[in-house]
Amino acid sequence: MNLDELKAQVALGEDSRRQFKQEMTNADSLAAEMAAFSNAEGGVIYLGVADDGGLPGLSRADVARLNQLIGNVAAQHIRSPVTVQTENLELENGRLVIVLTVPKGMDKPYFDRNGVIWLKSGADKRRINSKEELRRLFQSADQFHADELPTKAGIEKLDRLRFRDFLWTIYGMEFPDAPQERLTLLQNMNLVTDDGHLNLAGVLLFAERPEWIKPQFIVKAIRYPGNAIHVSEYLDSEDFAGTLPQIFAGAMAFVMRNLRKVQAGQGVNALGVPEIPPSVFEELLVNALAHRDYLLSAPIRLFVFDNRIEIISPGHLPNNLTVPKIRAGNSIIRNPILVSYIAKGLLPYRGLGSGIKRALESWPQIDFTDDREGNLFIATIHRKELAEWMNGENGTEKSSEKGRGSERFGTIFDD
């Protein structure tokens, strides 16, 4: 970094990645700043820069003292120790600014020597003050997953028939009759906690009535007239509850009955071909159910409009995952227990990271929005205008042979 680059950065002001400090004498204060950056996405502390962006700089003696302070704090005042970089830049008046770069931590959470875990909050920092924040921090570091969370449901809430069928189909095992054997098996399968309660994965996959235990984890589907959300007007609406396979089946049926169908050369009594391949919605609904953030008490929303279909999942993309990365096939497992069982045939899940790519191959007109402020991930599947279908788009027959009559374009309708 040169002096012009420094001035350009300072001119932008403080934010969640830049912090200005005219002076620093307290080791604990510096440790808090460094821990907060390490627990976030990393950042830069500019020592010798005033809060208002002024550049008073530091003396040579100050720089020597601060570099020693930085080394001691990084090694001894933060757990785990962090590796930082410093760069000294000379101002026009001969004084210096220390550019202290703190990387994103790989061993979160980081805390100071008093045991306080610090988080960035905009340009400021704050202490973690809730269990949910702590869980989310552990989740981002892959040390905790929401599907491991214990519930208040005992193993008596298990749907025996469903679980028995799964055991026999996947493992060729009989359902244990003895309660202790059953408990041990469920614990070994990571579906029950040490104290004998179903965890969230166990509830969502195998409980008798999951919606009675976790009513927030459902899919709410609405078919709106036109292209905007209406307060009270809709054409179709349904909530889908139950186990994840039941929710998936219900949501798929909702989409299919609200898609346009084209006869496409089939007989008069045929159901017709959906305007968008069903495999697109299979991939995107499985993705929503398997990878949503289950730390958020909110449903998945499925909105059908005239020109698009939206699948809105609670939780933005985790860690450093971005929309271009998921389009390329990259993925991070947010709920590993759920994914491991879904991959055994409970849902049409074919492999890590390939679902989005397959959906795009079948229907390229899909946009993805990673809404970090609203903490949402949105898949928008664009529908073709009805006029395009009437002009013979997407498999509709274009034949102009005489005598075809109304079969020329096929029969097009909305269910």
Image (tube, grey):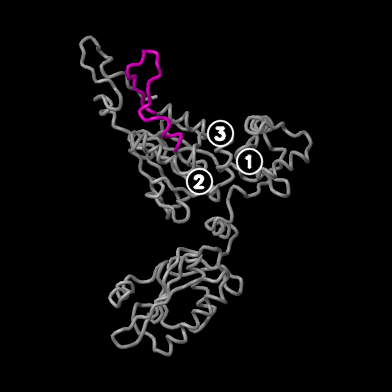
| Image quadrant assignment for residue 95 | bottom left
- Discs 2/3, front: 3
Q: Tag 3 or tag 1, which sits nearer the N-term? A: 1
Q: Which mark is residue 169?
A: none
Question: Is residue 395 rendered magenta in the image?
Answer: no
Task: Report the number of numbered marks.
Answer: 3
Measured Cα–Cα span from mark 2 to mark 1:
16 Å
- The kind of residue on which mark 1 rests is Val
**Left or right of 339: which side holds 271?**
left
Q: Which mark is residue 345?
A: 3
Q: Residues within 10 Å of mark 1 (few under 14, many from 20)?
A: many
Query: What range is drawn magenta here?
Result: 259-283
In percent of width and height, residue 72 lies at 53, 80
Q: Tag 1 or tag 2, which sits nearer the N-term? A: 1
> For mark 2, what is the residue?
292
- The kind of residue on which mark 3 rests is Gly
Q: Residue furthest front?
A: 172
**Left or right of 111: which side holds 370?**
left
Task: Note whether 68 is above or below 258 in the view shown.
Answer: below
Question: Is residue 263 rendered magenta in the image?
Answer: yes
Q: Residues within 10 Å of mark 3 (few under 14, many from 20)?
A: some
Q: Which mark is residue 203?
A: 1
Look at 78% across and 38% down and name the residue there: 179
